[in-house]
Amino acid sequence: DQQVKQNSPSLSVQEGRISILNCDYTNSMFDYFLWYKKYPAEGPTFLISISSIKDKNEDGRFTVFLNKSAKHLSLHIVPSQPGDSAVYFCAAASNYQLIWGAGTKLIIKP
Amino acid sequence: EPEVTQTPSHQVTQMGQEVILRCVPISNHLYFYWYRQILGQKVEFLVSFYNNEISEKSEIFDDQFSVERPDGSNFTLKIRSTKLEDSAMYFCASSLWVQGSNQPQHFGDGTRLSIL
């Protein structure tokens, strides 16, 4: 069941540049999407979310874009910092549960 | 900042034994959840709990699983007779409201369950 897909297992970005993480979904009934960041040996930490009535939400260095017609969302981090190195999960809210992507490991190179 | 706490961080149990994983959600949150992540696989939803009742559960959450909020602070997941395939990282989460009202779920650091 691949309702939420993150097709890039890893991404390497130079410090100071923009990191773009992508996520696709198949269920057009999803109306709320979230991005979580996860360090090893820790739980997922909420980063930013977006409702389907919006196409953009911004919080500091983090911006999430939603393209409903393409069923695609992306997380932009600018500028990227070494502390951003982590696994990033995209999740869609469906009733009470979150449906997760497989995650993208972001590596920020100095 | 308030956080979700889970104990123990690592639990090793013999197959067939019962195990209880414990969680203390954020104090003013009303919705509670358990998820698991088998090594190398996606995070999977197990169950959500509100007002002392299960509000939603997945196919994984069969009769071997139960949840309880025994007092005003703890939220537990019990696996009655563990199987090898129950080995996973189990995450507890809580939220103020249900999703869709811009209230994200906040997660604990997880309990690594190893079944021998």
Image (cartoon, grey):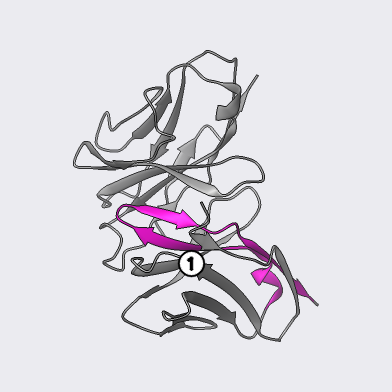
Q: Position of residue B61 (x, y in %)?
A: 40, 33
* Image location (x, y in percent) of residue B53: 22, 37
Judge whether residue A45 is colored magenta: no
Mark 1 closeness class: few <14, some 14–19, many ≥20 residues within 10 Å: many
Q: Is residue A86 left or right of residue A23?
A: right
The answer to whether residue A2 is above or below residue B68 is below
Which residue was labeled with disc 1? A25
Q: Amino acid at mark 1?
A: Tyr
Q: Nearer the viewer, residue B62 or B37?
A: B62
Classify the position of the C terminus of chain A by image quarter.
bottom right
> Chain for mark 1?
A
Residue at the right extreme of this rendering: A110
Above-or-below relation of A73 to B96: below
State the SS at label 1.
Answer: strand
Q: Which residues are magenta?
A: A81-109
Is B82 or B92 nearer to us in this picture?
Answer: B82
